[in-house]
Image (cartoon, helix red, strand yellow):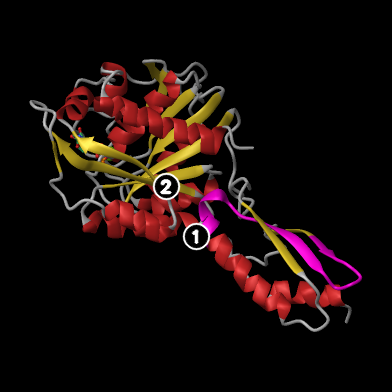
Amino acid sequence: MNLESKIVNALKTVKDPFSQQDLLVAGVVQGLKVTEKGSVSFVLEIDTQYLQKGRELKETLESLLKNIDDIGEVNIVLTAQRKPRANNSLQKSIPGITHILAVASGKGGVGKSTTAVNLACALQQMNLKVGALDADIYGPSFPRLLGINEKPTTDDGKLMNPIEVHGLKSMSMGYMMAEGAPAIWRGPMAQKALQQMLHQTKWGELDILVVDLPPGTGDVHLSLAQLTLISGAIIVSTPQDLALIDARRGLEMFLKVNVPVLGLVENMSYFLCPHCEGRSDIFETGGVHCEAKKLGLPLLAEIPLHMAIREASERGKPIVLNDPMSNESQIYRSLAAFVVNNLINKK
Ligand SMILES: Nc1ncnc2c1ncn2[C@@H]1O[C@H](COP(=O)(O)OP(=O)(O)O)[C@@H](O)[C@H]1O
Ligand SMILES: [Mg+2]
């Protein structure tokens, strides 16, 4: 067996830690070259956010290859520029929509919807064409958060027109139901309802669709991630441990379906007093920060618990629009800037 075959065979024994595929099949190893003197070089293409795991993979491969007889120098270059990839042909993009960003959380009540809506508004302020989908069919919150109480219309009886307020196109199961009416969905029905809202809404051209997922990691999430090409996900958590454990579960779910997780957002990070603007760390701080580090993910934002955020939401005008000059709005805008740099402007 020639040296190159030996090298390829050795590489085949290691799986891509993300897709669990053969490294060569997954396209992680690229530009493999073996010289006459037995020097081997190639590029290891890793998603940006998995850099730490990429470094470990590089070390594993270096020691593996150095054990092969007749091998000369081993030169592996690690790059972190690859685009999110689909792991199966079922993951389809939606015509006209360039990126889909999922906003997830392990449990309810952590401020996922508030974050999703403010993020969508902040992206829209950056002159992007933005849509927002309330995928929480069990407890839709867009009618309240965006102050919408009209029903979507249809021109052709096939596609629904999204409701546009503040320049943001949105769709929610809540637009179709009377407020307070309980949604009693069984699994397959829930998935079908979500698929319909995704595919039968006349979104038009969008740079990004922000999807506010239901809390947790249930079937709805899995089917969405398996059927739709999601460019990235953000996980929202509060500083308390319990929420963190769930956030970890969320991360694992996205990794399983090959959706890159851009990072964590800590909501209700600290308390900002509306009277004196003083900061109180009412929860033990650093929890999400520590967890993000452990998981090798960036902490994208620390959003304070502030009355103004809740009040703006209750009035149906997210704080980013209601009080754009506030510190809180600035935090959401930084988060939006991160999304633009790491998703939209990423080649
Ligand atoms: N940073 C914050 N400061 C103050 N109130 C907040 C903040 N984030 C969320 N809230 C409030 O907490 C409640 C739950 O938020 P919501 O976004 O509906 O959570 P989820 O979608 O995770 O269930 C809402 O009343 C919302 O206004
Ligand atoms: Mg919600």
Asked if the stretch drawn in magenta spans residue 38, the answer is yes
Q: Residue furthest left?
A: 275
Is residue 89 in view?
yes
Residue 229: image location, x then y, percent? 56, 44
Tell me the residue at 57%/61% (across/down).
54
Quarter the C terminus occupies:
top right
Is residue 176 in view?
no
Above or below, 132 relative to 87: above
Query: Residue at label 1?
Result: 256
Judged from the image, the quadrant occupied by ligand 2 is top left
How far apart are the two marked residues, 2 and 1, measured between alpha carbons?
A: 16 Å
Residue 317: image location, x then y, percent? 26, 20
The total number of labels drawn is: 2
Residue 188: image location, x then y, percent? 41, 50
Q: Is residue 32 left or right of residue 165?
A: right
Q: Earlier in the sequence, mark 2 or mark 1?
A: 1
Task: Give the crowd class for mark 2: few <14, some 14-19, many >=20 residues within 10 Å.
Answer: many
Query: Residue at label 2?
Result: 263
Magenta range: 32-52
- The disc labelled 1 sits on which kind of residue? Lys
Check disc 2 and report its element: helix, strand or loop: strand
Tell me the residue at 53%/44% (across/down).
228
Q: Is residue 117 left or right of residue 222?
A: left
